[in-house]
Image (cartoon, rainbow, N blue to C red):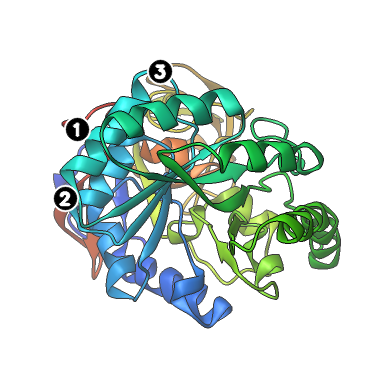
Amino acid sequence: MNWYTIDNIDTLDSPALVVYPQRVKENIQAAISLVKDPSLLRPHVKTNKIAEVCAMMMDAGITHFKCATIPEAEMLGNIKAHDVLLAHQPVGPKATRLLSLIKLFPSTHFSTIIDNIGTAAHLSGLFVENDLTLDVYIDLNIGMDRSGITPENALPLFLAAQKLPGIRIIGLHGYDGHIRDTDLGERNNRSDQAFSKVEKLLADIALLSDRPLQVVAGGSPSFPTHIKRKNVQLSPGTFVFWDWTYKHQVPDEPFEYAALVITRVISVIDEKTICVDLGHKAVAAENPLPRVHFLNAPDAVPTGQSEEHLVLKVPDAAIWNVGDVLYGVPVHICPTVALYDWANVVENNHVAEQWKVIARARKITI
C-alpha cells in the first residue's frame, strides 16, 4: 500500500479530512532538528487547530505557541500550554475575551500584539481595572503590508506604550509571510533586508531602555532564514501538515504531507471528464484552480468547482467508476482544515479515531 492509502476507506464518508500522526511527528522533529533547540520555536497553531496535534508538539519539548484567534488560544489553555502569543491585535470584544482567557487559565502565560497607541491605551485601561498586567509585543510591518507599524515609526509607539500601566512591552513581532522565494539564497537576502529594519529598531530602543526584548519572526517558508539570529523565536505553522504550495515553493525544507482530503467520484460525465464531491466547502477556495492535486490521479486537472462539486479532466474516464476514491493534497492546507469539524486519524493505513478540529469554531466557551 502507498503511505496514504486507507484500508477501511469504505467506512469513511467523503469529503473528509485525514491526518497521518506519524508524519506529523516527523515534521515536528524535522523542525526541531533545523533549529537545534525547541525553545526557539513558537509554532503558529492556525494551521492545525487541533488539541492533539498541539499536544504532540508539547511532547516534543515545544512550550511556546502563537495563535490568531481566541478559540485557538483557549484550546492551548485547555491543554496547559506554557506560553501563548495571540498574534492578532485584539479589538472590540476580543480584548475582554482575552482578559477572560487570562483569568480562566492562570497557569498559561498569554500575550498579544499592538500596532498603535489607541489599542495600547484601551488594553491598559481594561487590565488596570482588573488589577492585571498584559504582556505585549509591538507588531511590525516588515513588508507583508497587512498589519503592524513600520519599524521606522515604531520607536515613539514603544516609548509611549511603555509608560502605560496595565501593559508591559516585552518584544517585537515581525511576520514575513511575503518572503517565500524558491531560491534559498534569494529568500535569505530578502529576509536579511527586511530584518535589518528590526535590528535598527532594537538598537534604537537599546539606547533608551535596558529592557531586553524578545523577537518573534518567520513563517514556514522564511523561518530557517532566522535561525542564525540571536533572541529570535521562530513561528512556522504549516510545517506540521505541509501542503502542495510549500512542497514545491520551498523544496529545501524537510517536511512531508501529513494531512489530505478524501473525495469520491460521483459522476462520469464523458470519456475525458469526471466529477468528485470536493467543492468549495471542502477545500480552500481562495486560490485559482487547481486548488488540490491528487496523489493517485496526478493527471487529473480541475476545470470547474462549485459548492459541492469539482469537475476534473482526465486522460481516460473509462478507468474511473462512480465511488472511486481520490486522495488530495490541498494547495493551501490551513483554511482547508478550518472547513472540517473532525480530522480522521490514519495509523498504519487504517482510520482508527477522530480528532476534533476544535479551534475552527468562532467560540469554544469564551
Give the quadrant of the C terminus.
top left
Question: Could you tell me the amino acid type at mark 1?
Answer: Ile
176 in relation to 27, above or below: above
Give coordinates of residue 7: x percent, y percent: 21, 60
156 in relation to 7, above or below: above
Read off the residue under disc 3. 92
Read off the residue under disc 2. 354
Give the quadrant of the N terminus.
bottom left
Give coordinates of residue 197: x percent, y percent: 81, 52
Q: CA distance from mark 1 to mark 2?
A: 18 Å
Question: Could you tell me the amino acid type at mark 2?
Answer: Gln
Q: How many numbered circles does the render carry?
A: 3
Q: Residues within 10 Å of mark 3 (few under 14, many from 20)?
A: few
Q: Is residue 156 left or right of residue 30?
A: right
Q: Are marks 3 and 1 in contact (CB under 8 Å)?
A: no
Give coordinates of residue 35: x percent, y percent: 56, 77
Q: Are marks 3 and 2 in contact (CB under 8 Å)?
A: no
Query: Which tag, 1 or 2, sits closer to the chain's start?
Result: 2
Q: Is residue 179 left or right of residue 329?
A: right
Read off the residue under disc 1. 364
Observer-nearest residue: 155 or 347? 155
Q: Residues within 10 Å of mark 2 (few under 14, many from 20)?
A: some
